[in-house]
Image: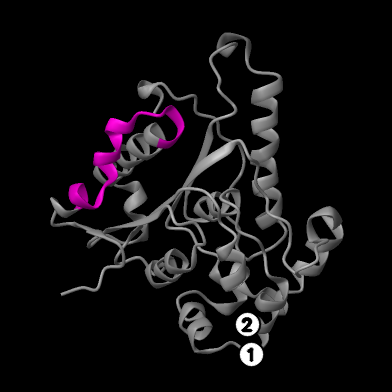
Amino acid sequence: LISHGFVWASIDRIDTYDVWNPQLIDQPLDILFALDQLASNPPEELAGMIDAQHAGATGYSFDGTNALFLGGTRIDPEFYLAQCSTADATAEAILSTFPSRYQCPAGGEWLESAAQAHEAITDSEDGLWQPLTDARIRAVMPLAGEGWLLFGDRGLAAVDRPTLLIVATQDELYAENALIYELLGTPDKALISFVGPGHMMVYDPEMVARMAHFAVAFFGYHLQGREELAQYFSEDFVGQHDDLAWGVYEGE
């Protein structure tokens, strides 16, 4: 991405968590703080080089969830707590891929402590928490993330900017990513399925290079205005590769 004219910024010491907890809210807020710092107080050697008005967000796994937040998703606390107490069939299928203690620790009581810490975020007229994003973030690319249980249908419908999801078909999170994709509110959305690998493809240099290809094309188109790059993350391009699938992969 840097070699294609982007400035890349990331947050040190952000890491995954054993169970869902207030870090789910704190991490996207940290990223927004970093964006503010880059815009108002850029590193001296990058002065005049950062276009903070055209930012994107991407991340893998737990950081893919951060990217979903930054795309405009909103927490639906009533939906989340209901699923943690009496999950329906869809939630049961998703919870079966990870222990319920991971996504619903102590019945989701962590949500109350997060609400107390972030009162400005929890106050709304529709029952959904406020989005954790910024108008300067123009496009997002969540990679193998999660969060349907937290956002629900209404929270995912709030996504309002171009979104490209990538996930491997043998990833335990695949079914959830397919559901998230279907529920995203933005009309400018795409899902590219990597056929065959699992969640740990992020450690495979070849798979990382392919994800980087799509990141350059997607963000180059949406953030840099390079219209010629649209073809490189298109349905036609994906269709030229046997180990890629456009949209939800139905298998053979």
Q: Is residue 247 above or below residue 134?
A: below
Occupied quadrant, residue 88: bottom right
| Count of all numbered marks drawn on residues in the image | 2
Residue 151 screen position, x and y as percent: 61, 67
User: Which residue bears the numbered disc 1?
Assistant: 86
Residue in the foreground of this view, choosing between 170 and 181: 181
Magenta-drawn segment: 222-238
Main SS of the magenta part reads helix
Q: Are marks 1 and 2 in contact (CB under 8 Å)?
A: yes
Q: Secondary structure at mark 1?
A: loop
Q: For the N terminus, give its image quadrant.
A: top left
Residue in the foreground of this view, choosing between 18 and 63: 63
Q: Is residue 94 above or below residue 235?
A: below
Q: Is residue 237 left or right of residue 81?
A: left
Residue 227 screen position, x and y as percent: 32, 32
Q: Mark 1 and mark 2: span between their CA atoms?
A: 5 Å
Q: For the C terminus, give its image quadrant.
A: bottom left
Question: Magenta stretch: residue 12 in it?
Answer: no
Amino acid type at circle 2 is Gln
Q: Is residue 10 left or right of residue 106?
A: left
Occupied quadrant, residue 211: top left
* Residue 83 - label: 2
Q: Is residue 202 left or right of residue 75?
A: left
Circle 1: is it few (<14), some (14-19), or many (20+) Cα within 10 Å? few
